[in-house]
Amino acid sequence: MAINKDYNNYYEKIGNEYNNIRLDTKNDRENVIKIIKKYANSKHKKILDIGCGTGKYGEMMQENGYKAFKEVHRVLKTNGILIIKTCSHEDLKYRFTAKFFPKTFEIDKTRYPDITELRNELSIFSKIEIENASIIVEKSKEKYLNQYKKRGTSNFSFLTEEEINEGIKKFEETYKGQDMIQKITKNTFVIARKD
């Protein structure tokens, strides 16, 4: 599949930079820990990180006859939980990339399953809960520009040079004279329990 090759080549080029850019928000990490502590009590001693990104590999596996959520359900012990951190289609509207690089919003809607779709796929679990989370992120304008210029956002691999440059220009015009920028970031946590 050509898209897989494109992703692999893209991440090969930007992997280290992407990791540094994406994991730099302390309050985002704290938000994840808060959700884990809320749902994973002292009985849940083991945590396994089984995936990341937009779930494209899981989608491809499903298309080829594999069911990832069924396997998670099978290997979870009784009273085990699955926590998925994702973005609903509503959450995606709050991304800066959606504002300054509009094509990324349409791309991301195809990469992130709608919460209703995710609920349906998790129907084998006994209870499904949804937690909406938002945090305020403050970063320097220079850090955002660096992220955009270095293509530190995976959906940028689908944009033309012209689209990227136009978005950077809009971003710079919007935040002219500002050194620090605050924005709201939204995520949705889907918690599925196995009885």
Image (cartoon, grey):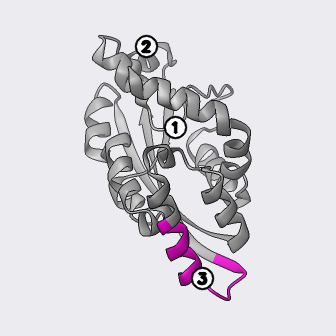
Badge 2 vs badge 3, beta-carbon distance below 8 Å: no
Amino acid type, residue under disc 2 in the picture: Arg
Q: Residue at x 57, y 35 (%)?
A: 10
Q: CA distance from mark 3 to mark 1?
A: 29 Å
Q: Which residues lie in the magenta part?
A: 166-181
> Taking 21 as reference, is 122 left or right?
left
Which residue is denoted by mark 2 in the rendering?
Answer: 74
Amino acid type, residue under disc 3 in the picture: Tyr
Helix, strand or loop status at disc 1: loop
Residue situated furthest front in the rendering: 162
Q: Residue at x 50, y 59 (%)?
A: 164
Which residue is denoted by mark 3 in the rendering?
Answer: 175
Q: Quadrant of the C terminus?
A: top left
Q: Residues within 10 Å of mark 3 (few under 14, many from 20)?
A: few
- Based on the displayed image, in which of its 4 quarters is residue 118 positioned? top left
Residue 176 lies in the magenta-colored region: yes
